[in-house]
Amino acid sequence: MFSDSALKKIGCFFGGVLFGTVGVKVLSSKDAKKVYTYCTAAALRAKDCAMEIATVIQENAEDILAEAQQINEKRAAEEAEKVKDDALDEVGAAEQEENE
């Protein structure tokens, strides 16, 4: 009545339905829920750990930025002082030439 191919397809269909039904039962069992709870708790702990590390990294980055800004301000002040000294030296040299 049915060919071997058709029987295989029907068998696969019912096997899939059975497997799906058993799978749903297993996934909704108390033991499975316990596993999900422990996995979720572990994920939350991992998230907290990652957030602590991110906070430390952010604080270090802010410290580095502040120190870098201080270095640049110091260099700019030194450069401005050097330009001022060079200008005064040029004015002094020009005045000496005029006096001679």
Image (spheres, helix red, strand yellow):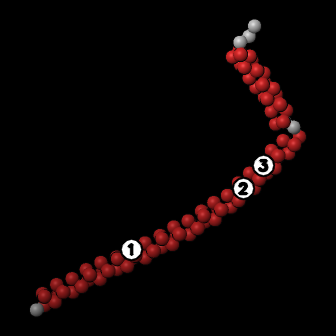
Per the image, the residue denoted by label 2 is 46
State the image coordinates of residue 78 (x, y, percent, origin top left).
37, 79
Q: What residue is rendered at 78% in x and 49% in y?
A: 39
Q: Secondary structure at mark 1?
A: helix
Q: State the image quarter where residue 54 is shown.
A: bottom right
* Amino acid type shown at disc 2: Ala
Per the image, the residue denoted by label 3 is 39
Query: Can you say whether 28 is above or below 54 in the image?
Result: above
* Amino acid type shown at disc 1: Ala
Is residue 98 shown left or right of residue 11?
left
Q: Secondary structure at mark 3?
A: helix
Q: Nearer the viewer, residue 20 or 75?
A: 20
State the image coordinates of residue 66 (x, y, percent, origin top left).
52, 69
Is residue 70 shown left or right of residue 13?
left
Mark found first going from the N terminus, 1 or 2: 2
* Front tag of 1 and 3: 3
State the image coordinates of residue 19 (x, y, percent, origin top left).
79, 29
* Amino acid type shown at disc 3: Cys
Q: What residue is rendered at 51% in x and 72% in y?
A: 67
Per the image, the residue denoted by label 1 is 76
Q: State the image quarter where residue 47 is shown.
A: bottom right
